[in-house]
Image (cartoon, grey):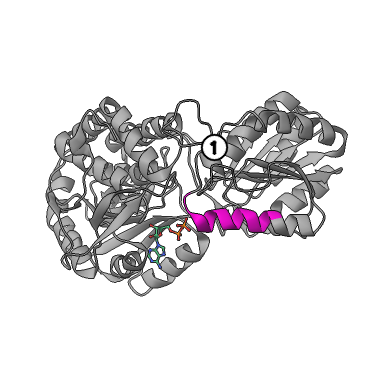
Amino acid sequence: MQLARPDLFRQQAFINGEWCEADSQQRYQIANPADGSVLGSVPNMSTTDARQAITAAEKAQPAWRALSAKERSTVLRRWHALMLAHQDDLALIMTAEQGKPLAEARGEIGYAASFIEWFAEEAKRVYGDIIPGHQADKRILVQKEPVGVTAAITPWNFPAAMITRKAAPALAAGCAMVVKPAPQTPYSALALAALAVEAGLPAGLFSVLTADADQAIEIGNELCSNPVVRKLSFTGSTAVGSQLMRQCAPSLKKLSLELGGNAPFIVFDDADLDAAVEGAMISKFRNAGQTCVCANRIYVQDAVYDAFAAKLCAAVSQLKVGNGLEEGISTGPLINTAALNKVQQHLQDASDKGAKLLLGGKPHSLGGNFFEPTVLSEVNASMQVAREETFGPLAPLFRFSDEADVIAQANDTEFGLAAYFYANNLNRVFRVAEALEYGMVGINTGLISTEVAPFGGMKASGLGREGSKYGIDEYVEIKYLCLGGI
Ligand code: ADP
């Protein structure tokens, strides 16, 4: 990895403003998912280290909270500027550990930085209220205060953005945050910490605990049970999210959970088909299909089914699979063998139950974790792809004829994160948008993520919203002051 700033590639964890080893002195290795080569190693931390980070956060938070919003904002703005100044290096680090094409990694760094900019601005707008009193001698004031020490557990699919989306509102509000990044992608998190130091963020406010999958569970236990931590924000699978919720129950922590999805993508017969194909490509194949808002079930109305399938196959056949560091690559490797196996299993199950293979359908000739972008037709509700997130480059096409029926099918899932549909009839647009039980609905677009809008899900897709003016609410307590005897 040729970095302009080699010191952004950190191989130690970051606690209380110090680069450090695990208390146990153990380390574990990080591999590049494109070729399995070892990138380096990081400390494999445990409960003792987590406690240290929490204690440091507890110490540092009161002084940070006491600063004016503008002072906190200034630090965040510098952090944002530094991320953009080092966008290329951060993107290289990300592609090396995560696999996504370099252009997508650069895009994610811009997206990740945008949360810091946004919440640097929002820090100054954490307004309270004055409520007309209920008695003549009383005055009622409402103010918002930081919740205190917070923790974040994040996934590997967006190694930078899932951290800044939590840390930026937390820090803006006056909280401290201890982050446990995904075992596979610690380097992006550590590079963010290096830039936070440069931005002037005081020690203890942002710590990064690196850990492999087993130690992540130990650290998770501590973050959930330690009474000093007042809030946990998690992005990951529904199973782990619900387990963390149980673990947080005894100490009644506040929770934000951004969990799995099973996004429907509906193409009605009045849709602009070229636009729908473009949207499906972005929504389905971005990050090799490894995002929680990826289209998982593509429903196409009878009259346009064959035409859409043909256009989609034409577009998918243009995707270039390969190492994300190489020029012109649109689809990188999957994160690991387990991810590859899941795609194959969904494919096999669908094929066994009668789906037809239109394109792709097997591990890529490059070997390793690469899989061919795949399109299946005649998929139906009996198949595994209808119920579970595939998290890979597999586009299953379902056929439907009736609007009410497709809405029922789209909602027939425990999940409720993102949904998409393409239609032009105005009445239909409102009818369908309002009937979909999802936190986010893309209408005639396949790309919905932005720092200015509230990201989050309903049902088993989680609790709370990230980004937008609502995002900072997750990190403040509402306090009401009642003044009497006036
Ligand atoms: P994925 O399957 O995409 O890796 P997970 O939900 O398993 O999704 O992981 C998301 C994050 O949650 C990672 O940082 C992982 O280390 C962490 N994690 C997984 N299991 C636990 C657990 N039992 N306790 C705490 N953190 C966990």
The verdict on residue 96 being magenta is no
Judged by its main secondary structure, the magenta piece is helix
The image shows residue 82, relative to residue 64, as above or below, that is above
Residue 273, position as x, y percentages in the image: 75, 27
Tally of numbered tags: 1
Mark yes or no: residue 128 visible. Answer: no
The image shows residue 78, relative to residue 372, as above or below, that is above
Horizontal side of 286 relative to 72 (left or right) equals right
The image shows residue 298, relative to residue 388, as above or below, that is above
Quarter of the image where ligand 1 sits: bottom left
Which part of the image, by quadrant, shows the N terminus? top left
The verdict on residue 345 being magenta is yes
Residue 321, position as x, y percentages in the image: 55, 36
Residue appearing at x 63%, y 40% in the figure: 373
Horizontal side of 342 relative to 315 (left or right) equals left
Q: Which residue is mark 1?
A: 286
Residue appearing at x 66%, y 33% in the figure: 316
Residue appearing at x 65%, y 35% in the figure: 280
Please state which amino acid type lies under the numbered disc 1.
Answer: Arg
Is disc 1's CB within 8 Å of ligand 1?
A: no
Residue 6, position as x, y percentages in the image: 20, 35
The image shows residue 4, relative to residue 267, as above or below, that is above
Q: Residues within 10 Å of mark 1 (few under 14, many from 20)?
A: many
Horizontal side of 290 relative to 103 (left or right) equals right
Horizontal side of 465 relative to 210 (left or right) equals right
Residue 415 falls in image quadrant: bottom right
Residue range highlighted in magenta: 335-347
Residue 96 falls in image quadrant: top left
Element at badge 1?
helix
Residue 230, position as x, y percentages in the image: 29, 61
Q: Nearer the viewer, residue 2 or 192?
A: 2
